[in-house]
Amino acid sequence: MNRTILFFGITIGYLCFSIQAAAHFLWVYPEDTRWVIARGISPTNLLPYNPENIVDIRALDQQWNNIPIHRTDENQRCVFQADQAPTVVVVTSEWGMRVNTPDGKKLMTRQQALERGLQVQSAFLSTQYSKNFFGPVSDWSKPAGLRFEIVPLTSLDQARSDHTLPIRMLFDGKPLSGCQVFSTEDRKGVTTDPEGKVVIPIRSGSMPLIWGHLDVPVSNDPQIDYHQFMTFLQVHTPEWQPNAARQGTDK
């Protein structure tokens, strides 16, 4: 049975749209003995945020086993310490309601915007996911269990040799067809095939930040028109000096 999600289908109707250069990213970087959950246009433009919006953090070892962490919600950011240095860190964030208006995006509900006399073109709920590699893992193609996820289909050593990284996009654990995927080296984007696969070019010798964007229409809530999902993949290993989060620095 083909489990691939088909876009623009009669019963599903998921939509993928392009993300512009000003999109705000979500990633993790080390700071002394801690790891910082970062949001902004990396690496130099960090944005403050409410740490309560970070709803899940998981640290994993090379075999994909969970590592206990100790989270601290600081002023306008979230950090954590781990019992051992993690190989993978995955993060889920819920950023809340936004509205699109002729004057741009506003961080408020539809009702709040209407009460202020704003013209609401659309309203949406924003959720972001981030998967960060800090070393090699036993199985690069193993999903981490994020609802919306980028899964490499080859090792990063092979990707460096081939100058490409094949990936699969998953949503609710199923391959996602017709989804546009972007990177810091290719902001025009490429589109996944019927099996949710796409090949990301690696032109500069460093692993780009990779992300995907998905809007799921909502029909049973008068406050929002769609639920917006974004997911990010970042590599932080020394041989892959990352373009986007070298030292740590509103969708």
Image: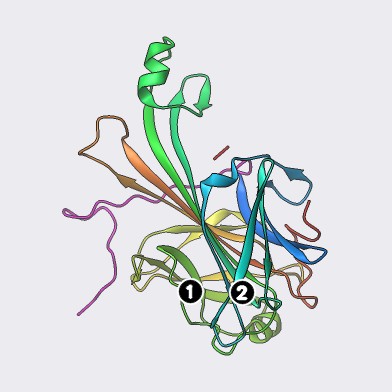
Is residue 21 left or right of 224 when viewed as pictured? right
Identify which amino acid the numbered label 1 is placed on. Ala
Q: Is there CB contact under 8 Å for labels 2 and 1?
A: yes
The secondary element bearing badge 2 is classed as strand
Which residue is depicted at the point 44% across and 27% down? 100
Q: Is the residue 50 above or below the residue 84 in the image?
A: above
In front here: 135 or 73? 73
To which residue does mark 2 refer? 88
Quadrant containing the C terminus is top right
| Magenta range | 1-23
Badge 1: residue crowd in 10 Å (few <14, some 14–19, many ≥20): some
Indicate the position of residue 63 as horizontal and vertical percent values. Answer: 56, 88
Q: Is residue 44 visible?
A: yes
Q: Is residue 19 visible?
A: no
Identify which amino acid the numbered label 2 is placed on. Val
Q: Is residue 32 magenta?
A: no
Badge 2: residue crowd in 10 Å (few <14, some 14–19, many ≥20): many
Quadrant in which residue 113 is drawn: top left
Q: Is residue 16 magenta?
A: yes
Indicate the position of residue 145 as horizontal and vertical percent values. Answer: 43, 71
Is residue 84 left or right of 196 when viewed as pictured? right
The secondary element bearing badge 1 is classed as loop
Q: Is the residue 96 above or below the residue 43 in the image?
A: above
